[in-house]
Amino acid sequence: MSDYFAHQSACVDEGAQVGAGTRIWHYAHVLAGARIGRNCTIGQSCCVAGSAVLGDGVKVQNHVSIFDGTTIEDCVFLGPSCALTNIANPRAEIARRALYEKTLIRRGATVGANATIVCGHTIGRYAFIAAGAVVTTDVPDYAFMLGVPARQDGWVSRHGHRLRGQDNEGCYVCPESGLRYAERDGKLRCIDLDEQAPLPAELARAEKGYRFFRVNRSG
C-alpha cells in the first residue's frame, strides 16, 4: 500500500497487483487478480475486473469499467464513461462467463469520452477513437476513428494531432513535435522515433494547446 495511493473510499481487493506510483480515486474498485502497472490513474467510480491487465502510465477517467478479457498496454488514455465489453451478444438468461472475448488496446491509444469498444478487437498503437464513436472492427496504428459505426478518417500523430498534407519526401509532419510519419502499404509509422520508446523529455510536456496548432496550421 505504501507504493501506491488509494482513496479511503476506494476498494482494492486482496490479491490485486498495483504498481508503484499509481493513484486510485474515489469509489473505484480493483478486484482480486487485476494487474495494474506503475504510475497509472484510476478515476472516480471505475471498476477493474479480476483478469484485466493494465500497463504502465495508463490514465482511466471517471466511470469506466474494465472487464475481464481486456488488456491495456502502456500509456493508454480511456476517456470518461467510455464503454468496454467482453460479450458481443449478451443475454441475461444465458451464462457466457467462459466465453469472454478478448480486447487489446495497444500502447499510446486514446479512447474518447462515451466511446464504445465492441469486444474481440484490437485498437492499434497511438490510434485515436473520437468521443461517442462505436468501434466494431480492428483499428490500425495511428488511425483516427469517428462515427457510428466508427470509420477511419485519416491519421493522427503520437501527440494526437490530425496529420494533413505531406512534405517533399512524402512524410506527414506533426505540428507540435515535428516528428515525421510515413505511410507504407496502408500503414503509418513514425520514422524519427522508436514506437516502443518513451517520448524524449522535451517532447513529453506540452507548452501550447491543441487549438493553437489547429489555428496556426489553417492560417
Image (spheres, rainbow, N blue to C red):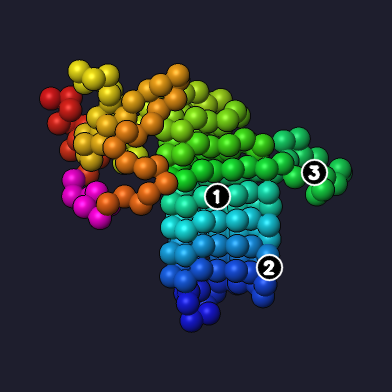
- The residue singled out by tag 1 in the image is 72
Number of numbered discs: 3
Q: Using the rendered image of the protein, determine whether residue 169 is visible from the camera's viewpoint.
A: yes
Q: In the rendered image, which quarter is residue 211 located in?
A: top left
Which mark sits nearer the N-terminus, 2 or 3?
2
What kind of residue is marked 2? Answer: Ala
Say few, some or many: other residues with alpha carbon within 10 Å of mark 3 (under 14 / 14 to 19 / 20 or more). Answer: few
Q: Position of residue 175 (x, y in %)?
A: 21, 34
The single residue placed furthest to the bottom in the displayed view is: 2
The image shows residue 71, relative to residue 56, as above or below, that is: above
- The residue singled out by tag 3 in the image is 99
Q: Residue at x 47, y 52 (%)?
A: 74
Disc number lying in front (1 or 2): 1
Whole-number angstrom distance, CA of label 1 to CA of label 2: 17 Å
Q: Nearer the viewer, residue 45 or 57?
A: 57
- Queried whether the magenta region covers residue 194, the answer comes back as no
Residue range (magenta): 201-208
Q: Nearer the viewer, residue 74 or 34?
A: 74
Q: Position of residue 194 (x, y in %)?
A: 37, 42
The image shows residue 150, relative to residue 108, as above or below, that is: above
- Queried whether the magenta region covers residue 206, the answer comes back as yes
- Residues tagged 2 and 3 counted as in contact (Cβ below 8 A): no
Quadrant of the rendering where the C terminus is positioned: top left
- The residue singled out by tag 2 in the image is 32
Which mark sits nearer the N-terminus, 3 or 1?
1
Q: Position of residue 69 (x, y in %)?
A: 68, 49
Whole-number angstrom distance, CA of label 3 to CA of label 1: 19 Å
Q: Residue at x 58, y 37 (%)?
A: 122
